[in-house]
Amino acid sequence: MTAEVAKKKKKAKGITSKSKKKTAIARAVIRKGKGTIRINRMNLNVYGSRYIRELINEPLEIIEPLNAEVDIDINIQGGGAMAQALSARTAIAKALVNYYGEKKLKEKLLKYDRNLLVDDARRKESKKPLGRGARAKKQLSFR
C-alpha cells in the first residue's frame, strides 16, 4: 500500500490555471514567493529568445507592484515556440487573476489585451481530398 502512495504524483500547492493555443498546453501554479518564474523548471531569464521572454513577461509588467510577491511555475507541452509562449502568458494572467481575485485587475488585463484571459479557440483545419491542404486544390488545365 505504501508503494502506491509513493507512486502518486505530489500535488502542487497553490492556485493552478491552464491555457491552450493550437496544440500547446500550459499549466501554471502560482504561490506566495519572491517573484521567480520558471518554465519547465528553467528560469525565465534563460528561456527562448528575448522576444518570447518579453511576451511571456507582459502580464507581470501590467501588474508591476504585485508581481514580486508570487512565484510562478509553468509546465508547457506540445506546439511550437510561439504557441507555447502565448499559452504561457495566458496561463500566467489567469493565475494572477485567480490568486488576487480583484475585479479591477481582470478589467485591466482585458483592456490591455483580451487574449491574456481568453484562450484562442482556433485550430488547424484538416486536409481535404483532391488538394495539397485544407483549401488548396489542384489547378485545372483547359488546354
Image: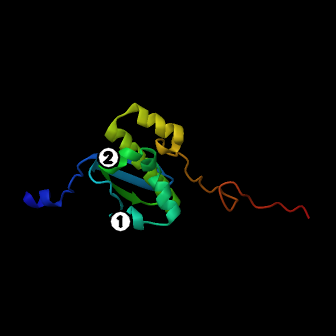
Q: Nearer the viewer, residue 18 or 129?
A: 18
Depth check, mark 1 against mark 2: the one in front is: 1
Q: Say which residue label 2 marks.
A: 16
Q: Position of residue 115 (x, y in %)?
A: 51, 44
Decide if residue 106 is on the left or right side of residue 125: left
Q: Amino acid at mark 2?
A: Thr
Tell me if mark 1 has few (under 14), some (14-19) or many (20+) residues whose alpha carbon lies within 10 angstroms of its own.
few
| Image coordinates for residue 28, horizontal then vertical, percent | 35, 51
Tell me the tag on residue 42: 1
How much space separates mark 1 and mark 2, taking CA atoms? 18 Å
Q: Residue at x 32, y 64 (%)?
A: 41
Q: Quadrant of the N terminus?
A: bottom left
Q: Is residue 28 left or right of residue 79?
A: left
Image quadrant where residue 130 sits: bottom right
The C terminus sits in image quarter: bottom right
Residue shown at the point (30%, 49%) measured from the top left:
70
- How crowded is the residue under tag 2: few (<14 C-alpha within 10 Å), some, or many (20+)? many
State the residue in front, 42 or 105: 105
Residue 19 visible in rendering: no
Task: Kindly state the secondary structure of the residue where label 2 is placed.
Answer: strand
What residue lies at 73% left-to-right and 58% top-to-bottom? 137
Q: Position of residue 131 (x, y in %)?
A: 70, 60
Check the image and name the residue furthest to the left: 1
- Mark number for residue 100? none
Between 45 and 117, the one nearer to me in the picture = 45
Name the residue at the top extreme: 103
Q: Position of residue 122 (x, y in %)?
A: 55, 47
Q: Residue at x 60, y 52 (%)?
A: 125
Residue flagged by tag 1: what amino acid is it?
Answer: Met
- Asked which secondary structure carries label 1, the reply is strand
Please say if the residues under marks 1 and 2 sit with CB atoms less than 8 Å apart.
Answer: no
